[in-house]
Amino acid sequence: CDAPLTTLVTFVATGDSNRMRLGYCIGCGYRGYRDRPAAAWFARFYREEWDNARVRDAAREAEQVRPWLSTVQRASVNLAGRMVPDRSRTVCEIGCGMGSALKEFETLGFSNVIGVEHSRFRSAVTSAAYGYRVLTGAFESGEVARVLGSLAPIGLLYTFHALEHTYD
């Protein structure tokens, strides 16, 4: 409706003057960005700061990782897995986090899983804990797209609670 948005929440990265505000329209109920930092800031925030990666040891945490999925996520992995009868086809999870869904795909018999994870810390944990290949970066980045293109054909692109973290 083009009415101005009322601020719901403001995110500010540690030690940074950039901010990102989310707002809503009291007239039509729309919720979205009021403003947001540049793409480079957004990428750095998710890569380095979002999950306190600077103060955590990925190798130590990888030793303690236990795959855990919510009931809804487990059901979505199982449903997605049924869509690809050829278990040798590549499964790529966008926003693989700590690798739990990739582990579930492996448990379902998929022999070739790969993750895309923006957080450098989470990428390192998943790689160290399970030995999976994880592309560190934004799913929409040219480098990630190039690598995924080289793996074509991909049998399944899967994501759960990750697309809202992409810049564009």
Image (cartoon, grey):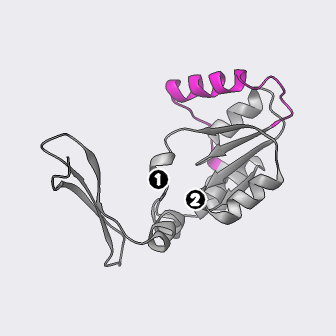
Looking at the picture, which amino acid does disc 2 mark?
His
Q: Are marks 1 and 2 in contact (CB under 8 Å)?
A: yes
| Residue marked by disc 1 | 165
Q: Is residue 38 above or below residue 99?
A: below
Q: Residue at x 18, y 54 (%)?
A: 5
Q: Helix, strand, or loop for circle 2?
A: loop
Q: Residue furthest left?
A: 26
Q: Residues within 10 Å of mark 1 (few under 14, many from 20)?
A: some
Q: Is residue 73 magenta?
A: yes
Q: Is residue 132 above or below residue 81?
A: below
| Residue 142 x/y as whole percent | 66, 64
Q: Residue at x 70, y 57 (%)?
A: 145
| Residue marked by disc 2 | 118
Q: Helix, strand, or loop for circle 1?
A: helix
Looking at the picture, which amino acid does disc 1 mark?
His
Q: Is residue 124 visible?
A: no
Q: Find residue 137 and report its image quarter.
A: bottom right
Q: Nearer the viewer, residue 67 or 77?
A: 77
Q: Find residue 138 and report its image quarter.
A: bottom right
| Residue 165 x/y as whole percent | 46, 53
| Residue 107 x/y as whole percent | 75, 29
Q: Which range is magenta?
A: 64-89
Q: Is residue 43 magenta?
A: no
